[in-house]
Structure formats: C-alpha cells, structure tokens
Amino acid sequence: MVNVEGFELPDDLYYWQRGLTWAKLEPDGNVRVGLTDLGQKIAGKILTVRTRAKGAKIVQGKAIATIETAKWVGPLESPISGTIVEVNMELRSNPSLLNEDPYGKGWIALLAPSNLEEELKKLIKGGTQEAVEWYKSEVKNRLKS
C-alpha cells in the first residue's frame, strides 16, 4: 500500500478515476467495489448509503449506490459493469464504515462482471507510478484550500 499525501492507495486494486471508486478482483471471479480513501474524505461524514439491489445490472460509470452526507447527496459510480451478487448490508446500520475503513469493512457491493477484460483497460492499476501520479493530482485538485 502506498500513502499519497496522507491518503491510502492499496496496490491490489483498480481505480475508476472519475468516480474515485475502486475494484478488487476476487479469487472466485467476482469483483468487490468501494469508495477510495480520498473519496470518503471529500464526501465528509457519511450518514446514509443506499446500494442498488442484489440482481441489479450495473453499467461502468453509472450509479451503484447513493450516499448522503451533511453537505451532499449523490451517486457513487461503479468502476465496472456487472450484476450485483451481494451488497454490504452492514452499511445500512453503520454507514460510517465507508469513512472508517473504505478498503475493508466499508466495501459497497460484489459484482459478477459482464465485460471485465475491456473495462479494466479504463481503470488505473494500483501499485503503479501512474496510480500515484493520478492520486497526487486528485488530492491537489479536489482538496484545494
């Protein structure tokens, strides 16, 4: 894991740049998705998470969930397309997990991917210089004081 300007950037994930979301390839072929550390910081204290239902078909770049904070309500973009096979039900009763553990207990959903090979080409692979440079740029541009 790399620390970029105080934000974690795990090496084993793929990142959807526009939505600040991540994808993790699971051994069973499914893909776990979530919000980046920077994404949760920008959002602020997350009060509510509404994830699309199990069985829903998701398109890359479209909403997989909606989050509500004290200052914002909006969609979280999915880094990949696929069908939701599991949602993190713990987020309903404890949405702050997205703030506290965005790469662990704060995951959003598990998808059966529909076009993984092609869509991974549109993501940035963690553990690369490209990922570090992208994240540095995002921190600078999105957290201007």
Image: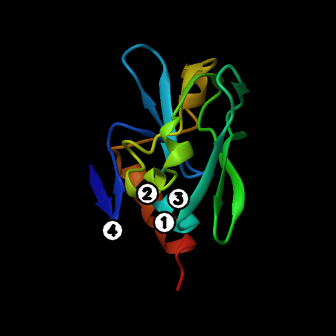
Is 110 situated above or below 13? above
Q: Nearer the viewer, residue 44 or 18?
A: 44
| Residue identified by numbered label 3 | 39
The answer to whether marks 2 and 4 mark residues whose Cβ atoms lie closer than 8 Å is: no
Q: Residue at x 49, y 26 (%)?
A: 31
Label 2 sits on a secondary structure element that is helix
SS at circle 1: helix
Alpha carbon separation for disc pair 2 and 3? 5 Å
Question: Disc 2 residue type?
Answer: Asp
Q: Identify the residue position indicated by label 2 in the image.
A: 37
Give whichever of discs 2 and 4 has the lower sequence position.
Answer: 4
User: What residue did someone put label 1 on?
Assistant: 41
Q: What residue type is labelled 3?
A: Gly
Q: Residue at x 39, y 57 (%)?
A: 100
Disc 2 to disc 1: CB gap under 8 Å = yes
Q: Which amino acid does label 4 sit on?
A: Gly
Q: How far apart are marks 1 and 4 (CA)?
A: 11 Å
CA distance for labels 2 and 4: 10 Å
Extreme-front residue of the structure: 93
Q: Is residue 114 visible?
A: yes
Residue 130 point in image, percent of width and height: 42, 50
Do the numbered discs 2 and 3 sit on residues whose CB atoms are within 8 Å? yes
Left or right of 61 on screen, residue 44 = left
